Amino acid sequence: MDETPYQRLARRLDELPNGFPPAPDGVELRMLAHLYTPAEAELAASLRLTLETSEEIARRLDCDPRETRSQLKSMARRGLINAGRTEGGLGYGLLPFVVGIYEMQVASLDAEMARLFEDYYHQAFGAVLAVQPAVHRVIPVGQSLQAGMEIQPYESATEIVRSAQAWGVLDCICRKQKALVGEPCGHPVDVCMALSQHPGAFDQSSVVRALSVDEALQTLDRAAKAGLVHSVSNSQHGLSYICNCCTCACGVLRGIAELGILNAVAHSAFINTVNEELCNACAACLDGCQFNALHLALVMTVDPLHCVGCGVCVPLCPEGALSLVRRPGEEAPPPVDEGEWRAVRAAARGRPLEDVL
């Protein structure tokens, strides 16, 4: 039996390093049908990660240039494919489903899509989260890092924000999705942060609200005070967002809490430690830990396997008994950039990267 356009697109998305594994009941196909027309799915399945102009795509596929351009522009506006500047003009390319297509639906997410994603999450998303290197990496909240510690720029949320040239904020699609399936999260929604090296990048956006650098830092602080975990894409350079996550809604952190995948997110280079002389076992920090990494005995103890190094609990201690230190041993740094991350992850999945570039 011939593949449908949605089956071809699903297979193509699963060829990407991020992955889009099939679910037993085929719910991934219903998600794609909710987003794409059959003709759009057919075209998207023919795209590459490398951006190409509409003329190049039409020539490669032997399609009508005007119709191809119209379809590509429509899909790009709806966050179904990537778009960006190339030497030949505006280029288009394939987006991963996560992080990519799904997150771009934050403004249009409805109850049907939310239910479809929840079904897909429980059936198949664990296979995405189990592959290394992980999609997301935890970075500590600023208040948890001691003065004088040697910290790399990619390990500091504040430095990541300050190094950008444009800043924005949008609603968290994970909390919006959980609310739509009847499981609302009590954490703030408007804390998903977008970053760019292009000044004014979000000024005309209908989804991202542009911020100043000071407003971005205030958003970061607001998220930390709400007990949220900072996470970024798992590389040293090219960081374009900071998610502020919780285990009750975040698709990645739910992998730890609900699916038991302890390395669903790359842990930070730090780990919590307890000063036993200062700890009075008041348990003020317990509720701040979302990962079951703190355990109360005569003093608080830390489970190194479950501690992701987020630092959320550190400022909660009234005695100052908690602090983050470098994890013992030689911690491998994250991939240098998205290119290295893609190469390593594609190899781990046994999928040739050149097939999709």
Image (cartoon, rainbow, N blue to C red):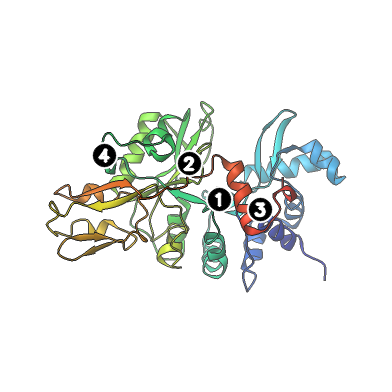
- Residues 142 and 336: in front is 336
Front label number (4 vs 1): 4
> Residues under labels 2 and 3: Cα distance?
20 Å
Which residue is tagged 2? 241
Q: Label 3's element?
A: loop
Image coords of residue 273 (percent x, y):
26, 52
The residue under label 4 is which amino acid type? Answer: Gln
Q: Earlier in the sequence, mark 4 or mark 2?
A: 4
Residue 9 appears in the rendering: yes
Q: Residue at x 60, y 52 (%)?
A: 345
Disc 2 crowd, CA 10 A, few/some/many (<14, 14-19, 20+): some
| Residue closer to the observer: 314 or 86 | 314
Residue 99: give its label: 1
Q: Residue at x 88, y 45 (%)?
A: 62
| Residue 116, quarter of picture | bottom right
Circles 3 and 1 in contact, beta carbons < 8 Å: no
Amino acid on which disc 2 is placed = Tyr
At label 4, counting other C-alpha atoms closer than 10 Å, the crowd grade (few under 14, some 14-19, many 20 or more) is few
Tell me, yes or no, whether the two marked residues, 1 and 2, touch with CB atoms within 8 Å.
yes
User: Closer to the observer: label 4 or label 3?
Assistant: 4
Residue labelled with disc 4: 146
Find the distance from the CA under tag 1 to the CA under tag 2. 11 Å
Q: Is residue 1 above or below residue 76?
A: below
**Dot 3 alpha-carbon crowd within 10 angstroms: few under 14, some 14 to 19, many 20 or more:** many
Identified by mark 3, the residue type is: Leu
Mark toward the start of the polypeptide (2 vs 3): 3
Q: Secondary structure at mark 1?
A: helix
Q: Position of residue 111 (x, y in %)?
A: 51, 62
| Residue matched to label 3 | 16
Q: Earlier in the sequence, mark 4 or mark 3?
A: 3
